[in-house]
Amino acid sequence: MVFKRTPSQVGRNVELCHPPKVLDKVKKVFELLRSGQRDKVEMWFQSERLGKFVYVTYAAVRDQAGDFQGVLEYVQDIKPFFELDSDFNRDI
């Protein structure tokens, strides 16, 4: 995990899961997803503190009727991708 989360954070209000300095951005992302203006929001940044290149995706979760149910956030360290020595890998 790039940013530590605990099982108790699932279902909690977003304000309780993100640091105050990014809260306005997270609220804007939720607004875009909830309203249907976007289905997915992606962002990335270099974290010198963590030594990682962080890629964050927020995806709207909707029911069969298309009604907003919540947000799936997933965070990846993509720094290892920059070090790949090939443009494909199909090893299954």
Image (cartoon, rainbow, N blue to C red):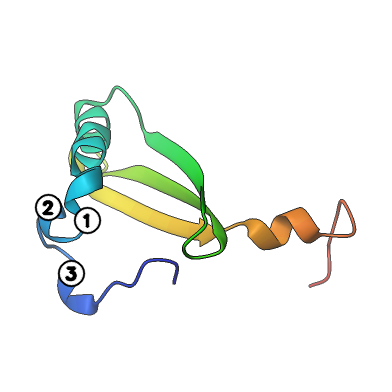
Give the residue type at disc 1: His
Give the residue type at disc 2: Glu
Measured from the top left, where is residue 20 in percent x and y?
Answer: 17, 50
In the figure, residue 31 lies in which quadrant? top left
**Cβ–Cβ below 8 Å for labels 1 and 2?**
yes
Give the residue type at disc 3: Gln
Residue positioned most to the front: 49
Measured from the top left, where is residue 88 in percent x and y?
Answer: 85, 55
Describe the element under mark 3 as helix, strand or loop: helix
Classify residue 79 as left or right of residue 32: right
Q: Nearer the viewer, mark 1 or mark 3?
A: 1
Measured from the top left, where is residue 15 in percent x and y?
Answer: 12, 52
Compute the Cα span from label 1 to label 3.
Answer: 10 Å
Compute the Cα span from label 2 to label 3.
Answer: 11 Å
Quadrant containing the C terminus in the rendered view: bottom right
* Along the viewing direction, whichever of 60 and 7 lies nearer the viewer: 7
Residue positioned most to the bottom: 7
Classify residue 77 as left or right of residue 2: right
First in residue order: circle 2 vs circle 3 = 3
Please report the residue visible at 43 percent of the width from the left and 46 percent of the height from the top: 57
Q: Which disc, if any, is residue 9?
A: 3
Measured from the top left, where is residue 61 in percent x and y?
Answer: 29, 46
Please report the residue visible at 11 percent of the width from the left and 62 percent of the height from the top: 12
> In this figure, which residue is indicated by the disc labeled 1?
18
Compute the Cα span from label 1 to label 2.
Answer: 6 Å
Describe the element under mark 2 as helix, strand or loop: helix
> In this figure, which residue is indicated by the disc labeled 2?
15
In the figure, residue 85 lies in which quadrant? bottom right
Residue positioned most to the top: 37
